Image: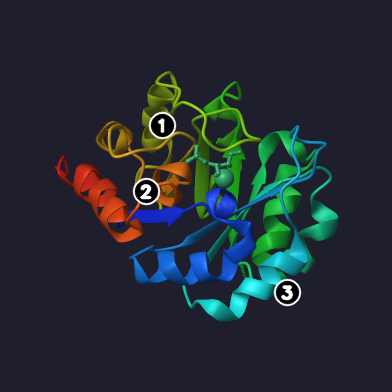
Amino acid sequence: MTRPLLVSPSILAADFARLGDDVRAVDEAGADWIHIDVMDGHFVPNISFGLPVIEAIRPLTRKPFDVHLMISPVDRYLEAFARAGADIITVHAEATSHLDRSLQQIRTLGKKAGVSLNPATPASVLKHVLDRLDLILVMTVNPGFGGQSFMPAMIEKIAEIREMVRGRAIDIEVDGGITRANAADVVRAGANVLVAGSAIFRAREYAAEIHAIRTAATSIAA
Ligand code: DX5
Ligand code: ZN
């Protein structure tokens, strides 16, 4: 099964003083989803933004909100993120003691359920929750900060996950250091959703950059 290629700009790299304008701008520039990084200063060594910010930008675009929760504990906040406007809610396997329960809770809320894996976490943790999943987010940097370099060792993990999910309606998303230079490599390995923060928001033309990433990614399509 071939999943559609999607680009999900991470607003962590947006200009927070004009966040609404940036959300509208990437929407118009061709973003498929809006990637929203929530960090708690506990699960990851950085704090970003939370519920009120998501609520504030929700009316500005109809694009799906791809919410990446880097928070622990996480279960007690899932309902609030669903209400704030998340369409896809991704939790870290390392941030919940009961991954199966967290995923069930997300689907019960009527949202798509994602699991994210830190670079050091093996793909095998996904094996017994595949039926509960809509998306797997392979971190290609250690989570917590934008602007880090892509870790090539994650290519092997993406390929392993691609084999694991074959035949299922599960998106494979990559996040961290994604640029037009490595888009083809991650897609060749099996990813179909590309998160990009600094590559897009530091570009002069958001549309041109999104287009360049998409073109690089689809140029290898088999
Ligand atoms: C890192 C975040 C990423 C980050 C990506 O913890 O999950 O989404 O914003 O930023 P870039 O594309 O700059 O690596
Ligand atoms: Zn992210």
Judged left or right of residue 222, residue 180 is right
Identify the residue shown where x is 34% and y is 66%: 29
Disc 3 secondary structure class:
helix
Query: Going from the N terminus, do you reach mark 3 or mark 2 first?
Result: 3
Residue on which disc 3 sits: 83
Determine which residue is flagged by label 1. 158
Tell me: residue 59, above or below residue 188.
Answer: below
Q: Are marks 1 and 3 in contact (CB under 8 Å)?
A: no
In the image shown, does 126 or 21 lie closer to the viewer?
21
Q: State the residue position of label 2.
A: 203
Residue 2 appears in the rendering: no
Image quarter where the C terminus lies is: top left
Q: Quadrant of ligand 2?
A: top right
In the depicted structure, whether residue 103 falls above or below residue 150: below
- The kind of residue on which mark 2 rests is Ala
Up the image or down, 71 lies above or below 64; here it is above
x, y percent for residue 141: 53, 29
Residue 154 location (% of width, % of height): 44, 24
Label 2 CA crowd tier, 10 Å (few <14, some 14–19, many 20+): few
Determine the residue positioned at 15% across, 44% down: 219
Confirm if mark 3 falls within 8 A of ligand 2: no
Left or right for 150, reference 125 = left
Residue 69: percent from left, percent from top: 68, 49
In front: mark 3 or mark 2? Answer: 2
Work out whether residue 220 or residue 34 is closer to the camera in this orientation and state it.
34
